Image (cartoon, rainbow, N blue to C red):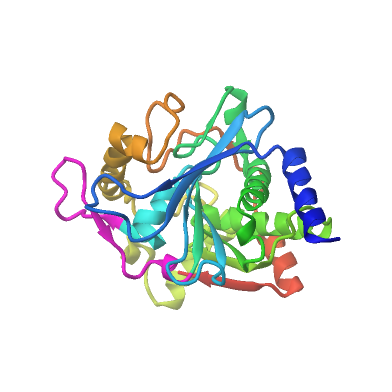
C-alpha cells in the first residue's frame, strides 16, 4: 500500500473510532514569569459514549528529543489524585514555591530533576471525577478498578491516534500509590490490545511503580515482619497498635499525615481553582464546581483485590519492570 493509501486508512480509523478529543498548547501559566521553557499541552479525551466521559490530561514533551525519547503515561494515586499532583509534587518540570506561599497565587519554580528532561509524559486525571475530568451524567461518574483500567486504555488509544508522531515511541506506564495497582492492569490491557491487533499498535516496553499498592492484605500485613527484620518495634515507626479481637493486624496503619498533606495540597488547590489559571489551562467552563488535588469523594469501587496476577503475566512475558520506594 502506498503512502496515500496508508493516509486514507488512517483517516478512516480516526472516523470509525470517533476520537472526541480537544487540546491546546499552553505557553504561559499564572505564577510563572515569561514563556514556559517546556512544551505543555492540555486537553480532553472522550472515553464514554456520546461524549459522556471526558478525561483531562497534561502532556509535556521531552526537553531532550521528543521523537526519540520514550512516552510515559503517569497515573497518580488515591484513587482520586490529579495528574497535576504528579507534575508539581513528583516528577514534573515545575512545582510551587511552598516556602514563600503567603495565601495569594503561588509562584512557580522549575524542577531541574524533572523526568521530562528525558521523556514525553502524559499526566492523566483518572478515574473519572478526578481533577478536571468530568461526565455529562451522574451515572458517568461511577468507576472501579476494572472500568478505570478500560477507560485509561481507551484514552491512550485515542490520544495516540490524535498524536500519531508518538505511536512508534517506546511506551511505558507508570504510577504511584493506588496508581501502582492500576499500572499493571493498564499494562496488561495494552498487551491484550496489541495481541488482538487493535489499532494503534503500541510500542509497549514495560512499567514503573513508585510506592505502589499491590495487594492490601500482603502490603499492610508485611509491616510487622518488616519491623522485626530491622529489630524495631511497630511503635518506633509511629504505627497504631490497636488490633481487633481476632488479633489480626488489619488495623495496623501508618501515622496520620493527613494534616501535613492538606497543608501542601492547599497550595495546589488554591492555584488550580483560580479562574485565571483555569482559563490558561483551557478548562471547559461549568464542568466542575471545585477542583481538588486529591478527592476521596469519587464514586469508585475497588473490585480487584490484588494486582499480583497482572504482575505475573507481564513478568512472564519479559517486559521491563522498575519498582521503587
Residue 249, horizontal then vertical, whole percent? 50, 55
Residue at 28 percent across and 41 percent down: it is 271
Identify the image quadrant of the C terminus.
bottom left
Give 129 or 61, whichever is nearer the viewer. Answer: 61
Residue 186 drawn above or below residue 136? below
Q: Specify whether 103 is left or right of 246.
A: left
Give 175 or 177, whichever is nearer the viewer. Answer: 175
Residue at 60 percent across and 32 percent down: it is 53
Q: Specify whether 168 is left or right of 31.
A: right
Region of the chain picked out in magenta, as a range: 95-118
Residue 216 drawn above or below residue 169? above
Q: Specify whether 219 is left or right of 192.
A: left
Residue at 30 percent across and 45 percent down: it is 268
Residue 239 visible, this orientation: no
Residue 49 visible, this orientation: yes
Identify the image quadrant of the N terminus.
bottom right
Specify the quadrant of the image occupied by residue 68.
bottom right
Q: Is residue 155 magenta?
A: no
Give 85 or 27, whichever is nearer the viewer. Answer: 27
Residue 158, horizontal then vertical, whole percent? 66, 46
Amino acid at each position: 500500500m502506498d503512502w496515500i493509501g496508508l493516509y486514507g486508512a488512517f483517516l478512516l480509523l480516526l472516523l470509525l473510532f470517533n476520537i472526541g478529543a480537544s487540546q491546546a498548547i499552553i505557553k504561559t501559566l499564572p505564577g510563572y514569569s515569561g514563556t514556559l521553557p517546556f512544551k505543555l499541552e492540555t486537553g480532553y479525551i472522550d472515553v464514554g459514549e456520546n461524549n459522556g466521559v471526558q478525561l483531562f490530561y497534561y502532556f509535556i514533551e521531552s526537553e531532550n528529543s521528543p521523537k526519540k525519547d520514550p512516552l510515559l503515561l503517569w497515573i497518580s494515586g488515591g484513587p482520586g489524585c490529579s495528574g497535576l499532583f504528579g507534575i508539581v509534587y513528583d516528577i514534573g518540570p515545575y512545582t510551587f514555591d511552598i516556602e514563600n506561599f503567603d495565601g495569594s497565587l503561588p509562584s512557580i519554580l522549575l524542577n531541574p530533576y524533572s523526568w521530562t528532561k528525558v521523556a514525553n509524559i502524559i499526566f492523566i486525571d483518572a478515574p473519572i471525577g478526578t481533577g478536571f475530568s468530568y461526565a455529562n451524567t451522574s451515572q458517568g461518574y461511577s468507576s472501579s478498578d476494572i472500568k478505570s483500567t478500560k477507560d485509561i486504555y481507551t484514552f491512550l488509544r485515542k490520544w495516540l491516534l490524535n498524536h500519531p508522531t508518538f505511536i512508534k515511541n517506546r511506551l511505558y506506564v507508570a504510577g504511584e500509590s493506588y496508581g501502582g495497582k492500576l499500572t499493571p492492569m493498564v499494562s496488561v490491557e495494552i498487551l491484550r490490545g496489541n495481541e488482538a491487533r487493535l489499532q494503534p499498535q503500541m510500542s509497549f516496553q514495560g512499567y514503573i511503580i513508585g510506592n505502589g499498592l499491590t495487594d492490601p492484605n500482603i502490603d499492610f500485613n508485611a509491616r510487622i515482619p518488616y519491623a522485626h527484620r530491622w529489630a524495631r518495634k511497630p511503635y518506633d515507626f509511629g504505627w497504631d497498635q490497636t488490633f481487633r479481637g481476632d488479633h489480626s493486624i488489619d488495623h495496623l496503619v501508618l501515622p496520620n499525615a493527613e494534616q501535613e498533606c492538606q497543608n501542601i495540597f492547599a497550595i495546589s488547590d488554591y492555584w488550580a481553582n483560580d479562574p485565571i489559571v483555569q482559563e490558561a489551562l483551557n478548562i471547559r467552563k461549568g464542568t466542575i464546581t471545585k477542583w481538588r488535588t486529591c478527592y476521596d469523594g469519587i464514586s469508585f469501587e475497588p473490585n480487584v483485590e490484588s494486582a499480583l496476577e497482572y504482575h505475573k503475566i507481564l513478568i512472564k512475558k519479559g517486559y521491563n519492570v522498575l519498582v521503587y520506594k
